Structure formats: C-alpha cells, structure tokens
Image: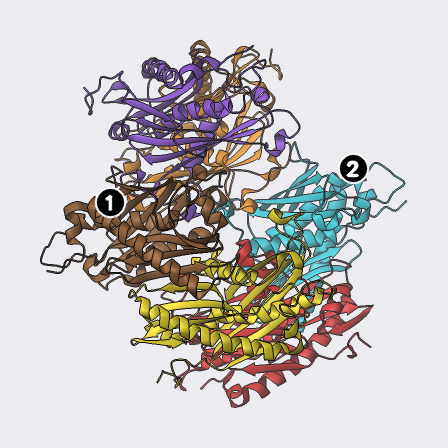
Chain colours: A purple, B brown, C yellow, D orange, E red, F cyan
Amino acid sequence: MRIDGRQAADLRPISITRHYLKHAEGSVLIEVGDTKVICAATIEEKVPPFLKGTGEGWITAEYSLLPRSTQTRNIREAAKGRLTGRTHEIQRLIGRALRSVVDLKALGERTVWIDCDVIQADGGTRTASITGAFVALVDAVNTIYTDPEKPFPIKDFLAAVSVGVVDGTAVLDLCYAEDSAAIVDMNIVMTGNGDLVEVQGTGEKHPFTKAQLAEMLTLGERGIAELIDYQKEVLGELSWKVGRVP
Amino acid sequence: MRIDGRQAADLRPISITRHYLKHAEGSVLIEVGDTKVICAATIEEKVPPFLKGTGEGWITAEYSLLPRSTQTRNIREAAKGRLTGRTHEIQRLIGRALRSVVDLKALGERTVWIDCDVIQADGGTRTASITGAFVALVDAVNTIYTDPEKPFPIKDFLAAVSVGVVDGTAVLDLCYAEDSAAIVDMNIVMTGNGDLVEVQGTGEKHPFTKAQLAEMLTLGERGIAELIDYQKEVLGELSWKVGRVP
Amino acid sequence: MRIDGRQAADLRPISITRHYLKHAEGSVLIEVGDTKVICAATIEEKVPPFLKGTGEGWITAEYSLLPRSTQTRNIREAAKGRLTGRTHEIQRLIGRALRSVVDLKALGERTVWIDCDVIQADGGTRTASITGAFVALVDAVNTIYTDPEKPFPIKDFLAAVSVGVVDGTAVLDLCYAEDSAAIVDMNIVMTGNGDLVEVQGTGEKHPFTKAQLAEMLTLGERGIAELIDYQKEVLGELSWKVGRVP
Amino acid sequence: MRIDGRQAADLRPISITRHYLKHAEGSVLIEVGDTKVICAATIEEKVPPFLKGTGEGWITAEYSLLPRSTQTRNIREAAKGRLTGRTHEIQRLIGRALRSVVDLKALGERTVWIDCDVIQADGGTRTASITGAFVALVDAVNTIYTDPEKPFPIKDFLAAVSVGVVDGTAVLDLCYAEDSAAIVDMNIVMTGNGDLVEVQGTGEKHPFTKAQLAEMLTLGERGIAELIDYQKEVLGELSWKVGRVP
Amino acid sequence: MRIDGRQAADLRPISITRHYLKHAEGSVLIEVGDTKVICAATIEEKVPPFLKGTGEGWITAEYSLLPRSTQTRNIREAAKGRLTGRTHEIQRLIGRALRSVVDLKALGERTVWIDCDVIQADGGTRTASITGAFVALVDAVNTIYTDPEKPFPIKDFLAAVSVGVVDGTAVLDLCYAEDSAAIVDMNIVMTGNGDLVEVQGTGEKHPFTKAQLAEMLTLGERGIAELIDYQKEVLGELSWKVGRVP
Amino acid sequence: MRIDGRQAADLRPISITRHYLKHAEGSVLIEVGDTKVICAATIEEKVPPFLKGTGEGWITAEYSLLPRSTQTRNIREAAKGRLTGRTHEIQRLIGRALRSVVDLKALGERTVWIDCDVIQADGGTRTASITGAFVALVDAVNTIYTDPEKPFPIKDFLAAVSVGVVDGTAVLDLCYAEDSAAIVDMNIVMTGNGDLVEVQGTGEKHPFTKAQLAEMLTLGERGIAELIDYQKEVLGELSWKVGRVP
C-alpha cells in the first residue's frame, strides 16, 4: 500500500476543466491529485524564421511554477532574469511531445504557443502539463479547422505519466513524497495507438536493472491508456476529429 | 448606464476564496468581475540586509500576468530575461501599500513575500491584487501570531480600487473596455479608517480638472468601504484581530 | 520656518540654462536648489513599430543618476545590467507627462528622446526633470517646425513639483532632508491652463487625510504656476509658439 | 550497410588520450569517429551551499560547443549572454550520470568540475562527453586518494552511447548524417555491472514501438560494454582502483 | 594649420574646476576644448575580496558617455543591459593608469571609485578622463590623509593625451574631426617624472612606421608636461603633497 | 638566462597545424611553447548593417579561454552571462589587427568570423591568436578567391608577439611565469613589410622609460620577422598570393 492508500498501478484522481480561461483559443485546468496546472493554447498567425514559406506550422511550449506552488517558495525566473536548466528541459519535452502527434503541414503556417503554469505542485507536473496541454491544443486547433475536406491537424491522442521504483516496487504516477523517495524516476509519453514518444528514466541515486525498466514501461502503458480514455470523455464529440483524414 | 449594465458607483461582483493554495501560509483567489488573481503570502524567517539586527520585518511584493491572462498573449518576463517597467511599478505599489498598515516592529525580523499572479485580466488587476493580498497577508501573519499579549502586526484594513472618467462621467471599478476608453485612470488605496495610502491619477490622453479629481476620490472612497466590508465578512472572526492592541 | 529658511509655499531658487549641450537638438541644465539635471531632447526620424504608418510621433524618456550625484555612491545601472524599479517608474512618468501636452499627429512620424541625467541630487529630481525637459523639448521641436500654416506640436506648458507633509504642515518643493522626514510624498504635474496631468501621492510611512491632500494640491498648483512663468521667461519669444494653432 | 560502411552494431573508432591538458587534475581528448571532445576534471576544495558541513562532495558538469565545431558556425553562448536549452539539458545529464557512480561521502567535501568542450562535432557529443569525462574523473579523483584504507570514491565504470532507428533498422553510435535521418534518437548510460543510469529516447519525428525500444537497448548494452573495456585498457593499472573497497 | 587653427604641437584650451559636486570626496569638471567630463572620486572603506587582510587598497574606474554627449545619440548601456567593449577597455585603462602612481599600501584597505561621465564629447574623452580624475583623486585621498608622519599615498603626477597622424603629420590632442581623419590613433599616459605608463597606438586604417611612432611620442611627452603643469596650478598648495615621503 | 633556458631575444618553439578542423573554411592549431590556441575562420555571406550595400566586407573576432586552459579553473563567460573586460579588449585587438592587412573592398560583402579558443594558456595567448588566425584567414579567403584578375584580399603578412622587462632586461615572447614577474608588458603587431599595426604597453606595476620602450620595440620587430618567416613556410605556395595584385 502506498503513502496515499493507492495500489502500485493506480493513478491519482484526475480532472480536466475545459475553457478555463476567457481569452485563450484553448485552455484547461488539469488536476492530478494535488497537482494543478493551467494549460493554455494560443494560435499565432506566424512561424519561426526557419519555417517561413514552407507551409508548415510549429508548436512551442513554455512552463513555469508559480512561486508558491511549491512547499517552500521558489524564486521567480523573471526575477532571476533567466530560466533554470530544469525549466528548459521541461519546455523542450512538452513541445517535442505535442509536435509528435501534430501534422504540421495540415496546421499551416501558424504557431501554437502552449503555456503550462503550475498553480500547485505535488509531483508529476511535467506529465500533467502534457496530458492537459493536449486537450487545450485540440480545442485551439479546432477553432481554425474550417475545411472538413482536409485532415484534422492532430493525428493521434497523447498523454504522459511518471513511473518509478519506490521501496523496491515499481509504482505509477508518483506524488511528491514518493518522488523524493524513489531510486528511479521515469517519464513516459505515449500516443493513442500505444507507441512511445518519449522515455526518460534517470537513476541518479541508484542505477536500475532492465527488469525494472520493463516493469515500469508496463505500468506506464496502462496508466496512459486510462488517461487517454479520460481525455476522450472530456473532449466528447470533438474527440472524433482527432486522427480524422477525409 | 455602463457597458456591463452597472451604475457609475457600482463595483463589479467580487469573491475572495481563502486557503486557495495548499502550501502557502496565506493565499486567496480574488475574482473581481472577470479579473482573477491568485495572491499568496509566504513567511520567510529573514530580512533584507538593511534591516538585519533592527528587530523589524519587511513586506515585499511580486506581480505577474500569466501569458494568456490577456486578450492577446503577452510574452513571459522570464523569457525576456527582465521585468517590464509596468511590472516594476505595480510590484512597488503593492508592497508599499501593504507596508503602510503593518507594524513592522510587531512583525519581528521576518519577510512576508506577497505573490500576485493574474490568471485572467479584465481591468483593475493591480487594485484586485492589493485587496486580495491583504486577506492572504492577514492569514499568513496569523500563523506566527502566538502571543496575545502583543499587538497584532496588522494595524488596519486596506483595499484598493480604480476610478476613471469615461465619456465625461466619473465611474468606479473600470473593466478593461472602460479602461481603454477612459481619459483619466486613477488608482486609490485606502485604509479601514478612511485615510489615503496611495492616490495615482494619470491623464496621459487628456489632462483632468480638480473637480473631476474630487468626484473620483468620492467614488473611490465609497468603493473601498464596500470592499473592506467584504474583506471583514470573508475573514470572519479573524477580522477582529486586525488593529488589535492588548 | 523650514530647514533652509523657506516658508511652506516657497520654491527653491530655480535656474534653467538653455543650449547646454553642443550636439543635442534641445538641451538644458536645470538647477532647483542643489538639484541639477541635464535634460536633452533628440529628434529621431523614426517611430516605434506600433506607430509605423500612422503619421503620429512619439515621446520617450530615460532617466539616470550619475553615481556620485547622491550622498553615498549609487551603483551604475549599466554595471548592474538592469534598471531599478525606481528608474523605470520615473522614466515612464516623464514620458507620459510630456506626451500629454504634445500633439503627436502634428509632430509627424518622429520620436523625441528625452534624456534626464541627474548631476547632483537634493530631492525633487523627477519633477525637475519634467520641468527642464519641457524646455528642451520646445527647443528641439522648434528645429523641425518649418511650416507656420500648421499647429505647433506642443499644445500647452507643463511643469512639475513635489509637495509633502513635514511635521504636520504641507510644504512645497521638498529638499532631500525634508523628503526623508515627510510622512507623505506627492508629485504633481500640471499644464499651463491649470489642469492636472499626474497626481501621485504615497503615504507609506503614514496614511494621509483628504484635507491634507487638498492642502498639498493647493500648494502644488501655486508652485507650478510660478515654474511655468519662469519657463516662459527663459523661452522668451519662443514661448509664444506653444499652443499656437494657425 | 551504413553510410560509413559500419554494421548496425558497430561502434565508430574510438581513442582516448589521457593527460591532454597541462594544468587540469584530470583531462582527456576523446575521439569517436570525427567527434572530438576535450574533457577536463578540476578538484575544488569547496562544495555548494546545500552540502556545507555534510561531509559529502559534489560533481557538476559544463558543456560547450566551440563555434566552429559544427558544420555551420554556432553562435557563442557567452556572446548571447545565456545558455541554450540544449546545453542546459546536456550539462545536467553529464553531471547526473557521473554522480551515479561516485561515492560522494568518500569524495569528501569537494566539488569536481567536469568541463566538456567539443572541438569537432559529428554526432554523439553528449555520450562521448560522458565516456571521456569518466576517465578524466578517475585521474582527478586519484590525485586526492591518499588513504588506501578508505574506499576509492568511484564505485563503478560508466559509459554512454547513442542508438537509433534509421531506415527501419536499429543502429548503434550514430554519426551526424544518421542522426539527422533517424526517426528515433536515444541515449543510454550504463555502469560497468550492466545497470542503467539513463535512458532517454525521443520519437519527435515518429513515435516508436516497444519492440524497437528493446532492440535499441540491446545494441546500447553491447556498445557500452565495449566502451568500458576500452576505458579499462586506457586507464591501465588505475582501472583496478575503480570500485575498490578495502 | 589644423582644422581649429592650432599648430601640430598645441593642446586645446584646458580647464579643470575642482569641487564640482557637493557630495563626492573629490570631483572635477575637466574641459579640453569642447570635451567635458565630470570626474568623481569616492572613498569606500572596503576592498575587493582578493585584497582583504593585505593592508592594501585599490583604485577602480567606471566611464560612461551621456546619451547626447555625442553627435548622434548613443544608446544608454543601462538600457542595453551591458557595457560595450569600448567602455570596458576605457575603464580598465583609467583604473590601471591611476593605480600606477598610487602607493596602495599607504592608501590602506580602502577602494577609491573613479567615475568619469562624459557630458560632451569632442575627441580625447579617455585621456581627459585620466587627467581630470587624477586631480579628483588627489582631493579625495587628501580627505583621509591625516598622519603627516606617513607618505602621501599618491607618488607622482599623472596625465594623458592623444596623438595621431593626420594628413601625414603627427599632431597633438586630436579633436573629433581630426580623430576621424587620422591614420594612427595613439594614447599616451605619463608620470610627472617623464616615465611612460601606457602607450596604445593603433593603425587599423593604415600601419605606421617607427619614425612616426617616435614623432608621436615626442609630441605626447611635451603635451603631458604642459598638462601636469596645469594640474599643479589647479591643485595649488595641495600639489606639494604629491610624492611626499616624510 | 631565462626561466626556460632561452636568451632574451629567443622565441619559444612554434608550430602551426593547418586544416585542424573538419568543418571550418580555415583553421589552425597554433602552439607557442605550452600555449595552444585553435583559430578558425568562417566565411559568412553577409555583413553588419553599417556595411550593407557598400560592397565592402568585414572581419570580426571572438576569443575565449577553455575553463581549464589556465592554472586554476576560470569560470565560463557563458555561465556568467557576460564577457569580461579582458575578453572584450582581446577580441577587439584581434579583429582590428587582422582588418589592417585586409582589402575589405576586394573581400566583397562578406564577414569573416575569427574564433580563437585557447586550449592551454602559458602566456601570450592574444599574440598567438593573431599569428595563428592570420594563417586560418588566408586559407579561408582562398576558398572564395576565384578570379585571378582581381587582387587577393589579403595585402600583407601579419604577426604579433609580446615583449616585456623582467629583472631589468627586455625579453621577447614571455611565458606565464615571466609575464607575472614583468614590470612592463607590451604587445606588438606588425606587418610583413615591417610597419606597426598595434603597440600596447602597460607599466601598471612600474612606469617605464623611453629607452626601455625602444629596446622592446627592437626585440619585437625581430621576433615578428621570424614568425612571419614561419607563416610563409607553413602556407607554402599559398603564401605567394598574399599581397598579390594582378
């Protein structure tokens, strides 16, 4: 039994509230246990210089912790004047993961800005950001999808979850207390058809075996399938457009 | 009649949710019409260098807009690497306003960090920040107030509101659409006993007369009295401690 | 009687030296008591992006203290790599105040850069900057005013002064020693026809009453009228062009 | 057959030159095909604040590309004034990987700075950095290992390699041309006893299957075993100290 | 005959006004033709880390151009957020030059900050800064020289001048128009007893011969002797203390 | 006899390896005693704004020390976020020196970026950078020199050396140990026909006499002639193109 009463393969309670912000083209509040992230998707009618004239679009992501989302206050990166290495890493991960399921040609010469702002942090903020941002992205892309003769620019579902090894046992969706005690910390991003987009496992405190890796992958696959089921439920009819090719 | 159906002297609907964040010593979500701000108060057991050894404490404030709180996405200051002049101005205003009602000696050698993060912006974000931060501050200070023989470190209530002149008429608590149309834009901060802490009026688009200034001050005074009544209601029994001297 | 022998409503001795710098389109040295500021106005034949193609011009201001203008040396902002909040606030105030009396359409697509560099500081540097910069601005704008059939781009005079409450009495034009002792510190900017452009009063150390506000406004109005008389004297014949509409 | 004539499971020619720099406690030039990296290890007799007084040491890494190590010149990060996200990610990876095989208690309150400077880049610079830095680290740590009654602070060997899927086939140790064509790009770090320290796989251009992941892990394991054999050969007698517990 | 009517070996008119700033320990306005620089010397009772506990002091210099000291407005380095290479070079030169005539042991553990702010630029701002700063330094050091049994911390006089080759002729003390036309530009710093402290000659537009170098050195020596005579006149009785050893 | 057995007028052993980097248009490794610098020359088909449309090209240089090129590790400028004054000075010197022998018109609207990265430092890194960069520049320029009817863009040879006064004697090409002990430190840059491009002598620790200056110039001239002979040998047939006018 885990610190919060869950079994090894249990996700925490999850909730995604769509249309959370008045001004954004797509936005959600995602809550995974006590972790809460606002994910906003903004459509901008231009692309970075390396894509000009190619007809292709781009997805880019930014991530931030509110100063008091964490147990002790973390200093604002705007006040420090620069992003930490951790933020850079997470922003790049979110952008890469979302791009893997977007048909950038079908998107057209547009940039979608994904903003993930963590209101409250209790472990798994980067995976919650990906899972929530996917839903905001679908809503935002839908506002520019006007021609049903064309493929919908989002090709497949996408969600992410953390797995780890705590007290010798592989567990799913670690809260902060578990995360601190884990010897391995791994983040997995998968698509709706069960393929891998990212696998990032780190055994800084303790190297891990191939057997443990296999166990964690199995748990992660199962968790992501549940998360994608929930995304479909939340998106309702709109979920049918994902992957649609006329 | 105003754009949203209010009379000149009407405030927008207001709501303050206490204990909004799990980790902070004090925190609220304040909603004023469509403007929503998370205000967190953090107690740190040290002071800036200029106060070391004086026995006095300090209050300092930081303010930020989420990128998609606004109609068009605003670039993250952390990405730009520096704060805008507007942010500097607002942060200094919030800190100064709160310090005016705090007995820094009674606070002791501690810093209270006030973080105001705007989730959604529809005019009046700086005044909503002050009104909400006051409540978060009372909650935070209460966690360290252990000796009833001593004065409570907060001496009086404090709230803020905007006033302006739109279409030749002075109006209270401007929403964004009114703000854009106003010839004068003024922010007023007052205490529970009706004294002024800040008066900041700007007639960039059109200088204003002393008569208009007087009208705006009258509206502001009335609005702040209402806001302070609501703060008292929200704080409940805790409101009795404000200004308490044994 | 005040620390330097003045009455409550007395300004300090003032002097404005026009054409102080060889290269600038307009420049003055303004001395207000021991406060000395060099104000330069530079005409640039382009505008910020948001004004391109509109036919309108812009006024922007920068402000700086020489390191040893102050009692103890202040660290150069260029060495720190960023502007302080105080500098941001003052720069924005100066720019906003000057723009309020300029007909930006008549100015045409040009930017006027106002540089206020404080050589010696003894209180009131921001108000001296505004009062001096106005004269430099008139000189600079005059160099591009070639068609007498068109309105002169400066619509009215403009000056600024500080007021405050020291030892319970409202006083005009505070020197540094008074500023440090004041419970309220207020800056007022007014036009030649007596309208208000900015009112910024702060009672950080002590909230103030509406009666004190009224007293300070009265003093400020009187001081600004004197300052504008002096600006007219200094500008001589050129002063007739201000506000001129053919 | 691959672009450079190798089989899928072949490493490129590798060479590690020890004592490459005159001043550093440990330093190597590692060449992996056309990729060349100078790795230096510096012992500093102090630790970051969070370790003061704990008796434990720290390993931290920095990584940089010379401007003309790459096909087109890359702009110096010192000139830009900040590190890119890619650099942050790589530095964190190198530091984390090395720390996983170091007994930080046995190291004592010291920091080892690892500097990896890429002289010439042809794919796999981050994995070459780890493999080379490990040897420099052993040399550096040996300079402070004076008491044979104590465990040698490095517990196990460590090397890293890239794997990927090119034209549907899993291949080992990708050169730049292969890297650009790969649908999956994965970096693996393993210890001498065959445990995993890092697994980072990204399918931005194309999600990948679990079968492909398994194939890549098998190739990576084989390549790392070869690399560690070569490290032992290069270190000669010194290799016996690694993992030594008296 | 030169552009401003001078002979090849003529200095421009020079004037040094002592005690120019109210607050600084030493300060002058130096005018060399149309070049005007405010030089301030500030005594700080601490030293940089590398001198702590050595009993020695330090001299450090900062240099800045007011934005409109130059023909076209130069952007403030504080606004850019960093110093240009030119400013770095000049600051280092001024500091090094002044330190060469100061007995840092006799100064004691203090830092003298030299601030050179160019009000108006017409060539030779760095050499005027050195010549003026020397006088400000003597005044500042004199405020802490209380024990006549000890050597005065300034060992010798110091001044600087520019020389160059214009239209094939070596000339002394170039104004801006000459500087732009010169094929060689050289700055010379010398002491009161005729020794060289700095020789910096650059022939970017045209290499120069050893004969031209010799001519320029002769002119420079002569100019510096005149400047030092003027410094002595300006310092009056205080000039006797320079180089004084009891 | 000097610390490393040389006579006063002896250079250290020198070696220049051409084509050191695979990707650069020109690149060398220059070794002068224990000082080792990689110099790369990159051709970019555009020029800075101030040269657009003029038909002229530009040469710009960047310089950096690897962190462990020095006896104690020096902090990376990329990590500090800004260049030191020393780096600025050296970069400007290298660029200026190389431009003095380049026919920027014949180069055409192109920029040559010179990157000097010090791998190991033992005194004289800036002069080695110039001497090595010259060879890399010739190789790079040769790749774009296609029309033998036009002048070769490099007009003359160029090399640099340090001289100084150690223990009262002028010596050539100081190693680090001598540099630290020298009372004067001078860098000289000269062309193939014996003209001076830069003379920079500093007597911070001790002013120097004109006689010492003359001695140092003589030594420097002799050393540079030897260096240029070696450059010619290394460039082989290509050396005939330097200065070639059809």
The residue sitting at the bottom extreme is: E237
x 62%, y 52%: residue = F91
Callout 2 environment at 10 Å: few (<14), some (14 to 19), or many (20+)?
some
Q: Quadrant of the N terminus of chain F?
A: bottom right
The amino acid marked with disc number 2 is: Ile
x 78%, y 53%: residue = F192
Q: Residue E246 versus residue D200: which sits nearer the camera? A: D200
Mark 2 vs mark 1: in front: 1
Element under disc 2: loop
| Whether marks 2 and 1 lie on the same chain | no
**Tag 1 residue:** B26
Residue D127: x %, y % from top left: 48, 27
D179 to the left or right of A217: right
Callout 1 environment at 10 Å: few (<14), some (14 to 19), or many (20+)?
many
B101 shown above or below B33? below
Residue B26: x %, y % from top left: 24, 44
The amino acid marked with disc number 1 is: Gly
The disc placed on residue F144 is 2
Q: Is residue B159 visible?
A: no
